[in-house]
Image (spheres, helix red, strand yellow):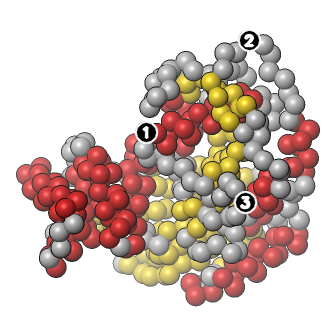
Amino acid sequence: MINKRLLIKNLLAQNDENSFYDKKRKIDIGQKEGKAKFLKHICALSNSNPKNNSFIVIGVEDEDNNIRGVDFFDDSKIQNLINAYLSNPPIVQYENIPFPHLPDDKVVGLVTIRAIEGLTSLRKNIWKYYGGTVFFRDGSMSMPKVFKSVIKDVNSKVVAAIESHSHNNIEHTLDGVFDFMNKRKDYNPQYKVFKEYFVVCWAGQKKEVKDEIFFSRVDIELINEQVRLFYSTLDEVAISFDNDSFKIVEYVSLGLQNNYKYYPLEETVIQFHDNANYSIDSTLVFQPPEFDKKVLHHIYNANSALIEHLKKGSKLKATQENDLNNLPAMLLICYLNGFHEAIEKLNEAKPYLKGHSNKVYNKYKESIRILRKVKYN
């Protein structure tokens, strides 16, 4: 089994980006430009490496390989995005890899791309790229090219060597368990061994609601691969497990006028097998709450006016400060109830929310994350 933290270190040890490896300070697939560039790199790496894995490391400075980290990205449906925009789409996996020196809310993103038979191309227009375009890697660049001949396999031996040097061992596993237990001891850390091989560690702030147990500030890691499976400072999470599986049910709090309710968002089951393999199956179980359209129309207009206040730099009253704190969730509810332009308003507000406070910006990111899950499904 490959230790993904070691794999990232071994990839960074390469002299520069190349035809099987790319690195990024960050990506933004919530915007058309960022989404288009991400798809371009996926397409180019898939075409340049038909016989082996390719990788994108996210959260690293380009000049000096300094690991800065990015926000946890829990989009289990990223393959749906790839399938929607690429013909002959490769198999793509996005994983969150914790590093000891990073803050709790930061990880390094690792995108693994495995090509399938046939040439990968854009299925349709996006941003300034045209449908039908074929991209390849030209050194460290992803460039459009005309396909004329059979693609030579020049990287398989190199990639195999890097992956071989990234295999896990008992020392790495034990170090990972101790690191997690020490770092998360403020939130009752626990661990369980599955199939005498896999080690899952988790921690969270426990609370009981009507005889049901939920956790907040949840952190879950698969230690064997040094992969963070789940992280949230806001949501409520139900955790259950048996000898063969570990299940996470994520809930989100939504409501109007101080009347909130928890709604199940996504159910993730990690199934451990006897052959030292595991599988992860995530299912969106979210049923958006429905509210009175007249009330929502008033809320939408009020939040639109609040955004205009932010744009002008006007000082907010105490009531407006409270409304600003709820703005991301309110626009989310509006969008889920048919106000499709609400997502544009939310993106329009992003720089002003980010500049206002970390608290309200984190709520913005939470709303965008829910929207992304719903949209991809």
Q: Where does residue 96 sit, x and y in percent of width and height?
A: 63, 59
The answer to whether 37 appears left or right of 264 in the picture is right
The answer to whether 301 appears left or right of 370 in the picture is left
Question: Which numbered circle lies on residue 32?
Answer: 1
How busy is the neighbourhood of tag 2: few (under 14 within 10 Å), some, or many (20 plus)?
few
Q: Where does residue 193 sit, x and y in percent of width and height?
A: 75, 70
Alpha-carbon span between mark 3 and mark 1: 28 Å
> Which residue is disc 2 drawn over?
148
Alpha-carbon span between mark 2 and mark 1: 30 Å
Q: Amino acid at mark 3?
A: Asp
Label 3: which secondary element:
loop
Alpha-carbon span between mark 3 and mark 2: 36 Å
Label 1: which secondary element:
helix
Residue 47, picture quadrant: top right
Contact? badges 2 and 1 (CB < 8 Å) = no
Relative to the observer, which residue lies in front, 188 or 49? 49
Relative to the observer, which residue lies in front, 287 or 324? 324
> Which residue is disc 3 drawn over?
64
Q: Earlier in the sequence, mark 2 or mark 1?
A: 1
Q: Earlier in the sequence, mark 3 or mark 2?
A: 3
How busy is the neighbourhood of tag 1: few (under 14 within 10 Å), some, or many (20 plus)?
few
Residue 276, picture quadrant: bottom right
* 263 over 31 or under it: above or below: below
Q: Amino acid at mark 1?
A: Lys
The residue under the point 23% across, 59% down is 311
- Tell us which disc is closer to us: 3 or 1: 3
- Tell us which disc is closer to us: 3 or 2: 3
Q: Amino acid at mark 2?
A: Lys
The residue under the point 31% across, 62% down is 352
Label 2: which secondary element:
loop
The residue under the point 55% across, 24% down is 122
